[in-house]
Amino acid sequence: MSDMVPEVLNAALDSLFTAKEPGQQEYQGVDGLLYCRNCHTPVQCRVKLWGRDKIVPCLCRCQQEAMAEKKRQDELVERKRKIRQLKATGIQEKHILEWNFGVAEDNKDIQMAKRYVEQWKKVKAENLGLLLWGDVGTGKSFVAACIANALLDQGIPVLMMNFSKILNQMGAMYSEERYRYIASFSNYSLLILDDLGIERSTEYALEQVYAVIDEWYKSGLPVIITTNLKIAEIRNPQDVAYARIYSPNC
């Protein structure tokens, strides 16, 4: 029985790898192999199978290049899909998607924001956040959005929200749901909290603000905060609750 195995295998190989006539885009070389008329590289090669030389199909250079290009295009499509998804979940206010470096004036704040993006690996590794403060209309949210969109375009998960929206979403949640909601922020590499200080200063609101920032602080990931508060108000807050919020971040 064992003597028949090689014969059966060889017969199977012969049926699989029978001689092939040149196709319209092929020609036979002096070595007996078929070649591609376009790139003049072989579409067949010789291999040893169970002690016998066999001619088997292989990819010529242009076929390999076509496969590589298809893979590149597939990866590009997937990357764009991922970025669209990241933007859909990370940017809650859709007009902010239009705020980017391409439409920004070249000033010191934008230059700082560009450096932040350029040094992102270091920024993330060293947990370097930003606090952008100033009066209404000074462009804090725009600068933060430019950073967010630049990182999102690189496929880096960013969440940009203001606390009023966070509090509204948490308002209808039970305590366990709120905990899971806050914990879900750690799925992002960067958290941008826009307009900190405009939310209602109730005990509940301040407690939730602190819970979000404290949970994020423990994650070891960077945070960017924009606020209309003065720097003196941030460093020396009148309210003890605000002191708890700012102390680990400023």
Image (cartoon, helix red, strand yellow):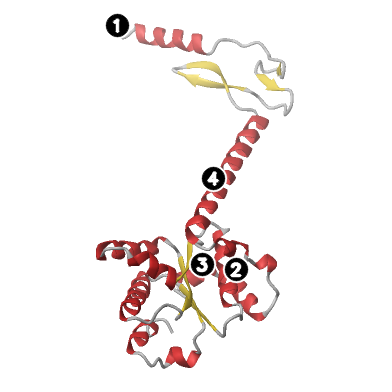
| Pointer 3 with pointer 1, Cβ within 8 A | no
Mark 3 and mark 1: span between their CA atoms?
64 Å
| Pointer 4 with pointer 2, Cβ within 8 A | no
**Type of amino acid at the residue the image marks with label 4:** Glu
Which of the two marks, 1 or 4, is nearer to us in this view? 4
Give SS at disc 3: helix
Residue at image coords 34%, 62%: 181
Which of the two marks, 1 or 2, is nearer to us in this view? 2
Mark 2 = which residue? 146
Residue at image coords 45%, 10%: 12
Mark 4 and mark 2: span between their CA atoms?
23 Å
Mark 4 = which residue? 78
Q: Earlier in the sequence, mark 1 or mark 4?
A: 1
Mark 1 and mark 4: span between their CA atoms?
52 Å
Q: Earlier in the sequence, mark 1 or mark 2?
A: 1
Mark 3 = which residue? 121
Q: Earlier in the sequence, mark 3 or mark 4?
A: 4
Give SS at disc 1: loop
Q: Which mark is residue 1?
A: 1
| Pointer 1 with pointer 2, Cβ within 8 A | no
Quick check: can you spot residue 240?
yes
In the foreground, 145 or 207: 207
Residue at image coords 60%, 68%: 146
